[in-house]
Every structure is written in C-alpha cells, then in structure tokens.
Image (spheres, rainbow, N blue to C red):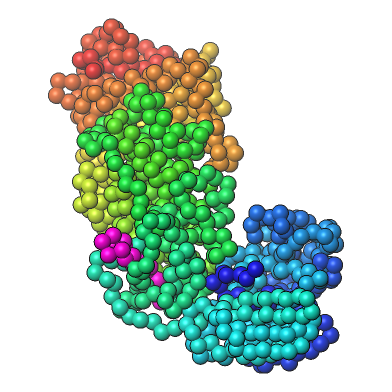
Amino acid sequence: MINRFPLILFVLFSTTVMLSCKKDIRNGNEIEIPAETAKEGFIISTTDFVFLDEEVTLVFDLSKGNKELMQEKDGLYLHAGLITSASASEKDWKHVTTEWGKADAAYKLKHLEANKFSISFVPKDFFNISEQLSATHIALLIRNMDGSKVARNKDGSDMYIPIRAKSQLQIGVSAPVLQPTYQEITEQDEFEKGYDLPLVFAVSAASAVEISLNNEVVNTFSQTTKVDTKIRLDSGGLNRLSIKATSANQSVQRDIYVMVSQDVTTAELPSGAKANGVTINNSTKKVVFALSAPSKSSVYLLGSFNDYVATEQSFMKRTADGNTWWIEVSDLDFSKQHTYQFLVGGQIRIADPYAVTVLDPEHDTSIQIPAELPSYPTGKTSGIVSVLNLSPESYTWQSTSYVRPHPYDLVIYELHVRDFLEKKNYTTLRDSIPYLKALGVNAIELMPVQEFEGNSSWGYNPSYHFALDKYYGSAKAFKQFVDACHANGIAVILDVVLNHAFGQSPLAQLYMQGGVLQANNPWFNVVPTHPFNVGYDFNHESPLTKQFAKDVMRYWIEEYKIDGYRFDLSKGFTQKNSGTAESSVGTWSAYDASRVALWKEYNNFIKAIDTDFYVILEHFADDQEERELANEGMFLWNNLNHNFNEASMGYIANSDLSRLFPQSHGFTQPRLISYMESHDEERLMFKNQMYGNTGSGYSTKTLTTALNRMEQAATFLLFAPGPKMIWQFGEIGYDISINENGRTGDKPSKWNYRSDANRANLLKHYARLIHFKKENTVFRNPASEYVLTGAVKYYILQQGNQKVMVIGNFDVVNQSFQVSAAMEGPWYDNLNSGTTVNWSVGQTIQLSPGQYYLLSKDILK
C-alpha cells in the first residue's frame, strides 16, 4: 500500500559509516556520495536494512534531535521496545526489555567521540523474541542514568527504526537525510523550488527501477542495485517522489514526500473574516481559515477535503503585517463534518488553536467519544486534528428568563466532575442538580473543562482553550447542564486557565525547537516571570496574547451562557519579573500597577459583553492591589483553610478568622470569595480526625465531634458578609486526604456518606445555613463588629432593624466570655427552634467545647 502522509518522507536514516569519508558502505559495496549529500543523520546504521536475526550497530549523533544530551560523555542508556502488529499505535511499545532508571551494561551506550555514541545488538536476542514475530519498528529513546534527560526527535517524539523482512525486495535510501520519526521526516524542513534534490538509494536485488514525481515518470534504470541521481523540484507544496523496483516476481514501491517552498501572496483578510479560527459564510458557502503565525515562512491548510496533502492550492496567503495566514475555501460540503490541520514551515502540524472540537489519536481511544463526531483520519496524518462542523445542530435554550443571584448572596459549590461523580459526565452531573438545589447552593463552579492534556486531570494543563474536553461528554450535554442549572436558579462559573498552557498547545508548538520553547514565540515567555508557574507562561503584555485571552473569554459567555469566570493564578498575569523561587513570592505579591491595568482591561472587556458577569480572581496579592481590583467590581479568592482548620482542630494560637471580613483587607465592599476548603487545600475533616486536639473527655478526632466542629466552622464561614464557597462533599464531612492517590489523582466520591446519621445532620445543617444566608439581606454588606481571635470568637452584624450574632468556643475546654452592650439580649436562637437567650451586660456566659450560637433580634427567614 502506498503511504499518503503529507510529511517529508525519506530514508530511515543516513547509512554513512566511515564518518570522515563521503562513501556509503552497504554490505561490502561502496557507493560514492556527492559531497553535498554526505550528511549524517540522528541515527547512523552499519546496514541498509535492519533484520531481526542480524547484528546491527547504531550510532547516535546527540547534537541532533532535541539535543538534550549534547556534551554528555558517559552514562547513557538505550530504552527500547517493538512496534508489532499487536500495537494499537506507535505509542504502544511491546517487548520492552530495558528498564527505566536502571544502569544495565546490556543497554549502555559506548562513547565514540563528541556527541557520538553507539550500541550493537541482534534484535531477536535483545528483545527475546522469535523471528516469526510480526515486528514493524524498533521504538527507542536515549536517557541518562536516572532518566532526567532524554534524547528524542526534535519534535519531541520517540525514535523509530523500521524492521525489514529478508524475503521481500527492499529499497534503502541514503540521501536526503531523515529524522528517525515514525512517519519519516527529513532533517531539512523545506526545499527551494527549482532545487535539484540528490537521490541516492540501493535495492536489495538487481531490479528495474522507475522514479516518478507526482505520478509522472522522470527516470528509469535497468537491472541495478544502486542509484545516484538528482530530481528537479519544480512544483510548490508537497511533492510525491515514488521509487518503484521490480525484480523477478517481486515489486516494491517507496514513496518520498518532499516539501517545496513557494512564493507567499500578500493579501488582506476578506471582509468580515476573523484573524483566527474559522469564519463561515452560509450565504456564499465560503469558509475562511485563519491562523496567527508571525515570522513563519509557509502555512498550508490540510484536511479531509484535500486528503491532508499540502498542494499549491492549499498554500495560505499572508496579511501585510506578517501576522496572519489565511485561505478562503469555496468547495466544501456543508452537509458533513470535516477535520483539518495547519502545516507550518513544512514540518509543524497543529490543530487550529481556535478549534471548538479536536480529535486526539493518543488519548481519545480510552474514552467514550460523542457519537456525532467524525472519525480520526487514520493513515492520512498524525497528531491532533480540528473538527469543522459546517451545519451544526442548533441548541434551543429553555431557561431564557434566568436572573443571576445577587453577588453578595452567592454560595458557590466548587466541584470536579471526575471526582464528584461515579459516572463522570455532564448528563450525570445534570441529574445531580436536585441534590445541589436541595442543599441550597446558587452557583456551581466547575474545575477546568476546556481541552486539557490526557484524560484524567484537574484540568490546569490546558491545550485547546476553545474546546470542551470530550472526557466529560458533548457540547450539547454541557449546554443541557447549564440550561438545567439556570432553570433551578443556579449560576455556572467556569475555572479558566489563562496564565499558562502546556506543550500540547498549538500556540507553544508553533515556536519550539527540539521540544524547547523559542524566544520568538509571540504568546509565551521562555522563562516564567513568577513562582509557581506550570507549563508555559503567557505573556499578557503581548497584543496576540491579549487578543487570544479576550477571544476565549467572549466565546464561553456567548456559546454556553456561562455566568462567571474564576481565573486561575491571576497574579501571574504580569511581565514584572519577580523570579521563580518560592522565596520570591513576597516580591511577586507586591503591588503591581501593570498587572492592575491589565486586569482592569480584561474586566472592562467582559463587562462590555455581560454587565453582571461574575469575575473572580485567584490573586492573593497585596491588599492595596486587591482593593483596587475589588473597587472595579472584581471578586478575590480569600483562602482561610489554615486558620479554619486550626480552629476546627481546637488549636487556638493560629485560628484568627478576622480575614473573613472585608474591613481587614481595607475593602469597603465584601468582594471576597471566602472559603475554608477548595480543590487545592487539605480537607478539614481529614486533619480533624488525624491531628485534632483533645481536652478532658473531649477530642476533635472522634467522628461525631469532628462533624460538630464542621457545623460550627460552617456557621462562622457562611454568615460573614458577602459570597462564600464550599468544596464538594464538605457538607457531608469528606475526609479523604488531598494526597490520596497523588495530589491530583482520582479521589472516591462519597455519596454513601449521606446514609450516616451524623453526616446527614451536617448536610441538613449546611442546607439550613445556606437558606438563611440567601433569604436575609443582613448577610450582604452590614455594619459589623467582630472579635475572631482567641478561643471564643464572635461577630455581630446589623442592617436596619435586623441584628445577628454568631458566637462560639473553638477550644477543647470550657471557656467563658463577658456580655458586652452589643451582646445584650434577648436573642432568638435560630438553631434551636423556639428557644431564646437573654443576656445582660456584664454577665459571664460559659461555653462548652465546640458550643456556638446563631442569634438574631428577629427570627431569620
């Protein structure tokens, strides 16, 4: 079968053995090679062909590929396996006999000279297999002893060497030089139009040879075993060079795809076309594809509509500013879905950064793909592809009159779809809404659902910011979930990751060399500007990054009717370089005028689209900076995990809860999303039971006491002014450590906890508290008085004639307090129906360990 991959496919690797000469030694025969083609590849072999039962010596030139092991002098090891007929893909290695991290002499490389290492072995012995095994490739990597550095191809892929069958006629090409990629790629990305391409190859038996270029015969040879010739490249785009050899009753054909550069046409985008992504004109049936790729020499549109072959017709135009490549296509079938990619600079294949759906050949095989999506174009291309649906099914929104909760009334339920549900999908999540409605929460905050690397993840490793990750289901199912939330009075807030992206992101891949981000990338910083960065750090001072971020923000609001964003690591949106060490956190957190200006710009952009949209920042910066952002209408995450946990465990010294109140931050409005648990913090119940304090006959480690302490903590949290957040299953005392199965690993959902009477009481308590908070405006932004240090903590809220006091003893021994004028009774005890307390000024009141009150002058609604 003829391969049709539109990559530059050539010989496996150079076969130059005598490194200082310009001759190719093949099984005892010498072929003179022109000086211009005597280049060595990443892997150099002693033979034309690798057979299972014959020894082969491989020489590795580590100055090529990703160059991660350049200048190493010793201690390098082969890691290898086989790709066989049983392999699901090129990633599915079989018969791996090497052991990662082990210093075994059997697969240690021999140092020859600077950057040159070798190893010799007989494949069937090395892999302990029979000659009958159907093996197609040796898959390999080179590592240092502990595996902290690894030599790969420059595109970051594994290395591959084809295994040949002795019974079949073979063609071995020695020029031009290839990378040892699974789909073979030349070391030279593109060739100039009109270039005479040196072509040197050997045939395993005397054969009649026919050479064709784009299906036209350009040369023939009779009964030869070696050919040294040149082929003129006159057509731009991808040229198919075919070598056909015929001997006796056997015939073999080898196709070499050669990328040839062509002149760029400068033209402005058609009227109405977007500078990125796809613009569809349903009236003219024309589609414009556009990609920002400054400084690139060429971009081709590849897709199911052109068999993924780069031709002169698929070569894209470039705008005069050099930023945008585009092409208008007018012959697409609007009745079907298409898949597509961009081929950049002759080698880099990326899906559209603005794609709303992508297909991933590596990770999609292990999940349930929505039935309406097309199949991956196997055999046509490699890597992630974009999906283009020209006639998408329209979704009719049912909840069209939904009104968002007052922002100060918000009780946000943060959840992770993977760990919240046993069936990890949006349909089951929609079925869970009655539970959340009964709890009383009026907002759900979803951990990131934009396309992330792999499948099982927290989602903070995004790759395609416009695409909904298919791990949890389809776009339609997600819209149905949002719609159902709105019908039940629940807002939907998305956790959005725009501080960084990971290596699968096409924005990163566009400007990489050997898997290393290059300085000319217009979106990312090569070196992060702040601590705690993961992945690649976005440069939000770059115009292209700003446009990308704004386009992402607009898309999810308009397409999915989202009500708010929680921006992950918002403090990282800065070009003020504070260093990456943890010791630099103070410098990073200091007031940053440029960061403030950036967030004001983004906030204004969002509010111009949706005036009452919730903008929430995970900022943790200087109070002055957060106050300025709050004055612009943004909300700030307020992490009180440590102090609440100290209080719930009964350790008083570090249990100050004063930061619950906006005054302690210098705020005039309660624009703090306060919480005692989030996805990123240890669970209070876990620490209560593991490390809780004890008093005389009282221990916060016991289950019932620990749950009672959680009731007390929740009461203090929820009634402080402004919006609040709780983490999934906190309402039933979730006590699985954040570090179980690894910090970001799968955690068990604990729906069965509801059948435990003590945990059910905590659930009822949460529901009652949330009801009070939503129904009584005194909890929005009242006048307040508080003392939240020490064992006995309290705060008093007053708005108009309504007055509320929350007071409790967080110690593990009895404590007393003296009644002040503001505490004077009588008060309704809202947690003990029909009960009142009547305290007098100066009276001493005793509180037992964990005892608390929710008191009010008027009965809370």
Q: Quadrant of residue 779?
A: top left
Q: Quadrant of residue 2?
A: bottom right
Residue drawn at x 40%, y 71% is 293
Q: Does 16 sit above or below residue 1? A: below
Q: Horizontal placement of 780 versus 157: left or right?
A: left
Residue drawn at x 30%, y 26% is 719
Q: Horizontal placement of 8 versus 143: left or right?
A: left
Based on the picture, tell me whether residue 140 belongs to the magenta stretch.
Answer: no
Expressed as whole percent of the image width and height from the top left, the position of residue 546 reads 32, 61
Residue 38 seen in the current view: no
Q: Which quadrant holds the C terminus?
A: top left
Q: Quadrant of residue 494?
A: top left
Q: Nearer the viewer, residue 320 or 493?
A: 320
Expressed as whole percent of the image width and height from the top left, the position of residue 397 reads 28, 40
Residue drawn at x 20%, y 46% is 611
Q: Residue furthest left?
A: 800
Expressed as whole percent of the image width and height from the top left, the position of residue 71 reads 67, 74
Based on the picture, tell me whether residue 281 belongs to the magenta stretch.
Answer: yes
Magenta-highlighted residues:
279-296
